[in-house]
């Protein structure tokens, strides 16, 4: 009797192990099945050159940016500038651009689903509509004028990215032979918007300012004087010129390094670290599944280094996409929609292939502080950048000039948002080796926002 009981327990145990294994497989299948089927060696989906042989990539209003030909090779839109301007969103034939839809969204293009596996009804794969408008990308790429950099614009209420350009770029229909060390193609496979980190310069002052608004009670009663060089921790923090006498509004509009260096030192390293993390600049977002690069913030070991860190120099690095979301959160009362690149997918029969829901960030800034920051950034536009450059826009913005050293011209930035109810857009523009933020990057922002708000 004892023996039988023992065997029954053994059988039960084996059955349980089998069930557990089956359950694990089912879970892995549901989670990773798309990736297994999308694996580049799967000859049902990839041609002999390893190019995705199914699925079309379209922009938000239905322009077909890439489609598979009869022989399974990849075709691209017939305008070369559009092809270059959408390279980092669509992807190249060799799969070098990791953020391109052909690579990042291969499972959605292949029409993978749990019921029929990789085989869509007509064997053609899916139509994948990006949130981008190819025309905005075209305008942004032209506005960069051959310079390296990036442009991103998105709707902070629903997360849809309308414009995402990274330069340098190349024509995916006629890819060049890129040699190691060729400066024209430096970092060409990197999507600077999602995957790059850069010295922010003065756009970072918005974060230091958020901390100062909440921690320095008499901030708005204070007067500041800038002689062109301010002592912080026994060493100077320099400005490009003497900004003279001003209040905190003036300090932001002048982008006075001396004032923000002093404020950073007064706030202290712990407080600044807390606000940079809260602003989401050291974290990562998932943009339709693509992780953004994490920025970094280092307050150094001296008060002067802390001062420079609060000014957006020293070792500060930010990812342009995260900076755009920070701008969106200021615009939207403290939380913004997480950016997304996929508008929808459709099977060849026109049936929606997947559903997407909006994701919201956590609170990046308190609501009252966001409102104050927005008013101060609107004042920047009327006082310094010029409202006339941005017709029909209730624009709030901050320029930046990130000194990169090594005898190179600075990284120039222009970041901000519109408060227009019918145009709820946040944006970031980075132009490498520009002259200054308001002139170089501001001009790019002006062209792109004009097309989006006032039509093209
Ligand atoms: Zn100054």
Image (cartoon, rainbow, N blue to C red):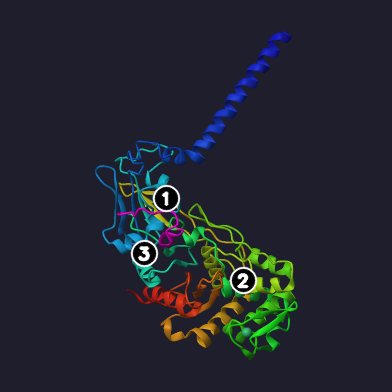
Whether residue 179 is in magenta: the answer is yes
- Among the 4 quarters of the image, the one containing residue 178: bottom left
Quarter of the image where ligand 1 sits: bottom right
Residue 347 to residue 41: above or below: below
- Among the 4 quarters of the image, the one containing residue 215: bottom right
| Mark 1 secondary-structure assignment | loop
Residue for point 73% across, 75% down: 265
**Distance in Å between CA atoms under marks 3 and 2:** 34 Å
Foreground: disc 1 or disc 3? 1
Q: Which residue is mark 2?
A: 313
Q: Which residue is mark 1?
A: 96
Residue for point 41% across, 57% down: 88
Q: Nearer the viewer, residue 217 or 441?
A: 441
Which label's residue is closer to the chain start, 1 or 2? 1
Q: Tell me residue 174's x, y (percent).
A: 30, 54
Residue 339 to residue 53: above or below: below
| Mark 2 secondary-structure assignment | loop
Q: Which residues are magenta?
A: 173-187
CB under 8 Å between callouts 3 and 2? Answer: no
Residue 295 to residue 347: above or below: below
**Distance in Å between CA atoms under marks 1 and 3:** 23 Å
> From this viewpoint, which residue is outermost toward the bottom?
245
Rate crowding at label 2 as few (under 14), some (14 to 19) or many (20 or more) other CA atoms within 10 Å.
many
Q: Tell me residue 390's x, y (percent).
A: 43, 81
Foreground: disc 3 or disc 2? 2
Which label's residue is closer to the chain start, 3 or 2? 3
Q: Which residue is mark 3?
A: 133
- Among the 4 quarters of the image, the one containing residue 162: bottom left
The chief SS type of the magenta part is loop
Residue for point 62% across, 20% down: 14
């Amino acid at each position: 009797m004892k023996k039988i009981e023992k065997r029954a327990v053994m059988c039960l145990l084996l059955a349980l192990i089998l069930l557990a294994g089956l359950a694990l497989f089912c879970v892995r299948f549901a989670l990773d099945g798309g990736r297994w089927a999308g694996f580049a060696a799967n000859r049902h989906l990839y041609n002999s050159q390893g190019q995705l042989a199914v699925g079309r990539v379209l922009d938000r209003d239905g322009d077909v940016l890439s489609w598979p030909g009869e022989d399974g090779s990849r075709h691209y839109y017939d305008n070369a500038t559009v092809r270059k301007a959408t390279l980092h969103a669509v992807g190249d034939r060799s799969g070098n651009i990791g953020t391109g839809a052909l690579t990042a969204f291969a499972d959605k293009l292949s029409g993978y689903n749990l019921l029929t596996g990789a085989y869509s009804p007509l064997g053609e794969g899916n139509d994948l509509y990006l949130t981008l408008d190819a025309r905005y990308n075209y305008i942004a790429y032209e506005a960069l004028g051959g310079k390296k950099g990036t442009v991103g614009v998105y709707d902070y209420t629903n997360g849809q990215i309308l414009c995402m350009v990274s330069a340098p770029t190349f024509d995916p229909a006629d890819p060049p032979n890129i040699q190691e060390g060729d400066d024209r193609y430096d970092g060409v496979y990197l999507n600077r918007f999602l995957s790059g980190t850069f010295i922010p310069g003065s756009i970072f002052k918005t974060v230091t300012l958020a901390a100062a608004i909440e921690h320095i009670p008499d901030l708005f009663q204070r007067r500041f004087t800038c002689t062109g060089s301010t002592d912080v921790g026994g060493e100077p923090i320099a400005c490009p010129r003497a900004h003279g006498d001003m209040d905190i509004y003036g300090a932001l509009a002048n982008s006075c390094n001396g004032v923000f260096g002093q404020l950073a030192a007064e706030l202290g390293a712990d407080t600044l670290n807390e606000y940079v993390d809260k602003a989401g600049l050291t974290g990562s977002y998932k943009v339709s599944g693509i992780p953004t690069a994490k920025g970094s913030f280092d307050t150094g070991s001296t008060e002067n280094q802390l001062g420079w860190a609060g000014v957006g120099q020293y070792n500060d690095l930010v990812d342009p996409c995260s900076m755009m979301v920070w701008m969106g959160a200021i615009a939207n009362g403290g939380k913004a929609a997480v950016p997304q690149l996929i508008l929808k997918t459709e099977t060849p029969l026109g049936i929606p292939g997947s559903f997407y829901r909006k994701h919201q960030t956590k609170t990046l800034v308190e609501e009252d502080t966001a409102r104050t920051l927005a008013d101060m950034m609107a004042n920047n536009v009327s006082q310094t950048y010029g409202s006339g450059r941005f017709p029909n826009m209730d624009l709030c913005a901050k320029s930046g000039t990130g000194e990169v050293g090594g005898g190179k011209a600075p990284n120039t930035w222009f970041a901000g948002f519109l408060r227009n109810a019918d145009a709820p857009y946040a944006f970031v523009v980075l132009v490498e080796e520009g002259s200054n933020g308001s002139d170089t990057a501001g001009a790019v922002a002006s062209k792109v926002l004009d097309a989006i708000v006032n039509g093209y």
